[in-house]
């Protein structure tokens, strides 16, 4: 008897005239998502991005400042090592390249004090700011 009822329900469900309780109407796994569902998901992602973006941008700015500070400290310590070896700071003619390559006729130079001249450049690839700071300090 139960088997006959079950077959009858299956037959009736095939033409969707009678639907058993607990079944989902009109949704098959092959149907995918509706446009409304996709828009809701995109909206949620946009809200999360709008909340997180300002905080991440602030972190990026602080990281750049910290990297610049560390780079300046590296150059400053290299200048101090140059002074302890040579007995003076690099002259304006020598510039900060005296930390990387040995100036002609200089006694006591045990460098290079920096691996390469990239540490002497700022983000705009201009070394004049660092050279001016050393000349004023010296």
Image: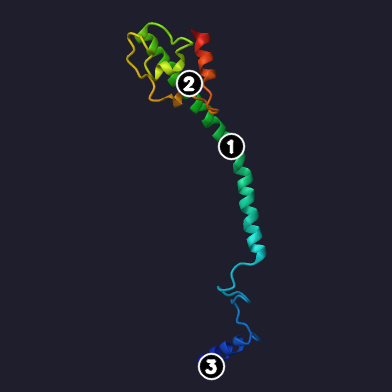
Q: Secondary structure at mark 1?
A: helix
Q: To which residue does mark 2 refer?
A: 72
Q: Residue at x 43, y 21 (%)?
A: 74
Q: Is residue 49 above or below residue 36?
A: above
Residue 55 picture quarter: top right
How many discs appear? 3
Q: Is residue 78 above or below residue 53?
A: above
Q: Between 129 and 55, which is closer to the camera in this rendering?
A: 129
From the viewer's perspective, is the residue at label 1 or at label 2 nearer?
Answer: 2
Q: Secondary structure at mark 3?
A: helix
Whether label 1 touches label 2, CB < 8 Å: no
Residue 57 marker: 1
3D distance between C-alphas at marks 2 and 3: 86 Å
Q: Residue at x 58, y 75 (%)?
A: 28
Crowding at mark 2 (Cα within 10 Å: few <14, some 14-19, many 20+): some
Q: Is residue 113 left or right of residue 37?
A: left
Whether label 2 touches label 3, CB < 8 Å: no
* Residue 133 in picture, x, y percent from top left: 52, 14
* Residue 25 in picture, x, y percent from top left: 63, 77
Q: Secondary structure at mark 2?
A: helix
* Residue 123 in picture, x, y percent from top left: 53, 28
Q: To which residue does mark 3 refer?
A: 4
3D distance between C-alphas at marks 1 and 2: 23 Å
From the viewer's perspective, is the residue at label 1 or at label 3 nearer?
Answer: 1
* Outermost residue, front side: 104
Q: Between 22 and 118, which is closer to the camera in this rendering?
A: 118
Q: Residue at x 61, y 89 (%)?
A: 12
């Amino acid at each position: 008897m139960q088997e006959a009822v079950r077959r009858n329900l299956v037959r009736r469900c095939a033409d969707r005239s009678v639907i058993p309780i607990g079944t989902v109407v009109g949704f098959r796994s092959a149907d995918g998502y509706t446009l409304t569902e996709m828009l809701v998901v995109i909206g949620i992602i946009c809200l999360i991005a709008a909340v997180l973006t300002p905080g991440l941008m602030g972190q990026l700015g602080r990281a750049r400042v910290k990297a610049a500070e560390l780079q300046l400290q590296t150059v400053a310590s290299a200048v101090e090592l140059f002074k302890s070896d040579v007995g003076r700071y690099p002259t304006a003619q020598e510039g900060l390249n005296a930390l990387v390559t040995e100036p002609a006729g200089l006694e006591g130079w045990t460098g290079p004090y920096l691996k390469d001249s990239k540490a002497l450049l700022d983000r705009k690839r201009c070394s004049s700011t660092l050279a001016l700071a050393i000349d004023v300090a010296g």
